[in-house]
């Protein structure tokens, strides 16, 4: 018989997990303190924007119940996933306040529950945090971990925009376990859930916590290395970063993923995880100059290198205005947090540049993020954004931008506009009147 599952936190990750479990036949009870989220889920709707989640919740609503009541969630399940926020603190590490609050409530309910319960922390935590969560659960429940209840750390390695696919087809599964029984139950849940057969790595809490945070830190290193190659290529006769990274990526010691020269990394995970990796190492008396320097170099790319390039182009066109298409940190999300575009806009407006912006999904978030800045015009469409400008930056590779032709650019913009493309979306023929500049190519 399948275990009954509960999911604490119905946000971007938790809601997707709930939907995926329900789609594979589990009865899942979702718990969130946000009444609106609970109501939406109970009405068969997703409270978050993530491709595929709405359909899963609608199609499998008979397997889903949402509640704001912790007691209801715990007494009606055998296994609980906790996926609440772990926001960054000022010193770069993560706060476990939300996880602690959930753990304390779960603990107090376990006090009177006679059956074994497995608690799984999926929120990203740092080395040492699981030990504290275990102590907290033992204190509040009056029970013993590994005997009366089990505890696992089971972070996800998903990317926003493809969470459903990533969750059901993981490259690997990471389990930090209090004991073998807890790990066995969780491994079985995953084997019954996923569509592929990846390695499942089981280990103690500390090693799992380090693995999770090291992975994103390593990705930032790779991205930044590719961006450094992009800068060299831009300044080297005939330089083309794609030629270099395509070849490098074919070497199995290196691999192709996250090795594309472009603007900079951003979003809610990479920058903060890299900072947290460095902070975690300090706790054990170790230094991580690679991680620290990676962040500094990333800041250089987004705050200096790209803005300088754009300023030079604007100067050549004698304009103090630019259009920027794409504000989210990647496609398939509404999030603009630490996106390349936001940093570039900040840098340019500081120099008095007027910026027109448009994004198919991230306008509301961008309006909040850029609220304090003068000289920003928020456009309702790509055409409105381009209109009347002489220089344009493509900063997120949304599909709708791919359909803009060379003629469209020329018609809407200047007779000889400059298009700076961070994503190599176009292959205009040489006869077009525009100047097409690809990031990472000598221009
Ligand atoms: N979103 C991602 O791409 C991603 C990827 C990997 C890891 N993570 C990690 O997963 C965790 C959650 O991230 P997210 O993006 O889903 O966050 P989110 O902010 O989208 O959602 C968190 C949810 O938790 C709820 N919540 C807060 N306190 C609660 C409580 N006491 N009881 C029940 N629910 C509560 C909130 O109302 C919210 O709905 C974080 O630790 C994050 O680092 C996220």
Image (cartoon, rainbow, N blue to C red):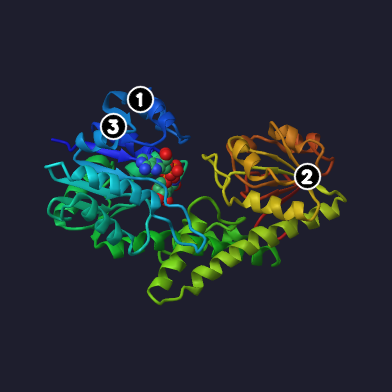
For residue 158, above or below residue 125? above
Question: Can residue 293 be seen?
Answer: yes
* Contact between labelled residues 2 and 1, with CB atoms less than 8 Å apart: no
Q: Earlier in the sequence, mark 1 or mark 2?
A: 1
Q: Which mark is residue 42?
A: 1
* Contact between labelled residues 1 and 3, with CB atoms less than 8 Å apart: no
Screen quadrant of the N terminus:
top left
Q: Which mark is residue 127?
A: none
Residue matched to label 3: 22
Q: Nearer the viewer, residue 136 or 432?
A: 136
Image location of residue 173, percent across then percent down: 29, 52
**Picture quadrant of residue 83:** top left
Q: Residue at x 23, y 55 (%)?
A: 139
Q: Residue at x 34, y 48 (%)?
A: 101
Q: Which mark is residue 375?
A: 2
In the picture as drawn, the residue positioned furthest to the right comes out as 318
Numbered label tally: 3
Q: Is residue 299 left or right of residue 347?
A: left
**Picture quadrant of residue 42:** top left
* Real-space Cα separation, disc 3 to disc 2, in angstroms: 47 Å
Q: Secondary structure at mark 1?
A: helix
Q: Residue at x 13, y 50 (%)?
A: 148
Observer-side mark, 3 or 2, equals: 2
Q: Residues within 10 Å of mark 1 (few under 14, many from 20)?
A: some
For residue 44, above or below residue 145? above
Q: Earlier in the sequence, mark 3 or mark 1?
A: 3
Question: Can residue 12 be seen?
Answer: no
């Amino acid at each position: 018989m399948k275990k009954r599952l509960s999911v604490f936190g119905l946000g971007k990750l938790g809601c997707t997990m709930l939907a995926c479990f329900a789609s594979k036949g589990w009865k899942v009870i979702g718990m969130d303190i946000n009444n609106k989220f609970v109501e939406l889920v109970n009405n068969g709707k997703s409270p978050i924007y993530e491709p595929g989640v709405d359909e899963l919740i609608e199609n499998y609503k008979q397997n889903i119940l949402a509640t704001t009541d912790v007691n209801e969630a715990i007494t009606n399940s055998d296994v609980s996933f906790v996926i609440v926020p772990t926001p960054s603190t000022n010193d770069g590490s993560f706060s476990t306040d939300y996880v602690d609050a959930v753990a304390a409530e779960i603990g107090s309910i376990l006090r009177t529950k006679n059956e074994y319960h497995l608690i799984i922390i999926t929120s990203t935590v740092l080395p040492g945090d699981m030990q504290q969560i275990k102590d907290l659960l033992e204190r509040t429940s009056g029970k013993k971990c590994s005997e009366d209840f089990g505890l696992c750390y089971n972070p996800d390695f998903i990317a926003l925009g493809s969470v459903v696919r990533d969750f059901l087809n993981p490259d690997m599964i990471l389990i930090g376990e209090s004991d073998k029984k807890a790990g066995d139950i969780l491994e079985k849940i995953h084997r019954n859930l996923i569509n592929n057969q990846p390695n499942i790595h089981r280990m103690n809490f500390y090693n799992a916590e380090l693995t999770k945070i090291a992975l994103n830190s390593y990705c930032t290193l790779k991205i930044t290395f590719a961006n450094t190659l992009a800068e060299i290529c831009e300044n080297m006769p005939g330089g083309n970063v794609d030629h270099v990274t395509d070849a490098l990526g074919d070497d199995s010691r290196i691999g192709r993923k996250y090795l594309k020269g472009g603007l900079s990394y951003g979003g809610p995970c990479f920058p903060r995880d890299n900072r947290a990796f460095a902070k975690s190492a300090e706790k054990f008396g170790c230094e991580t100059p690679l991680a620290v320097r990676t962040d500094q170099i990333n800041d250089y790319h987004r705050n200096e290198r790209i803005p300088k390039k754009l300023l030079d182009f604007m100067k050549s066109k004698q304009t103090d205005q630019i259009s920027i298409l794409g504000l989210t940190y990647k496609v398939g999300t509404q999030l603009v947090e630490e996106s390349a575009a936001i940093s570039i806009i900040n840098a340019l407006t500081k120099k008095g540049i007027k910026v027109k912006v448009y994004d198919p999904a991230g306008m509301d978030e961008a309006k909040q993020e850029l609220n304090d800045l003068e000289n920003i015009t928020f456009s309702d469409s790509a055409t409105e954004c381009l209109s009347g400008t002489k220089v344009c930056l493509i900063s997120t590779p949304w599909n709708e931008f791919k359909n803009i032709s060379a003629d469209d650019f020329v018609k809407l913009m200047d007779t000889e506009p400059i298009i700076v493309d961070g994503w190599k979306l176009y292959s205009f023929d040489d006869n077009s009147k525009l100047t097409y500049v690809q990031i990472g190519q000598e221009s």
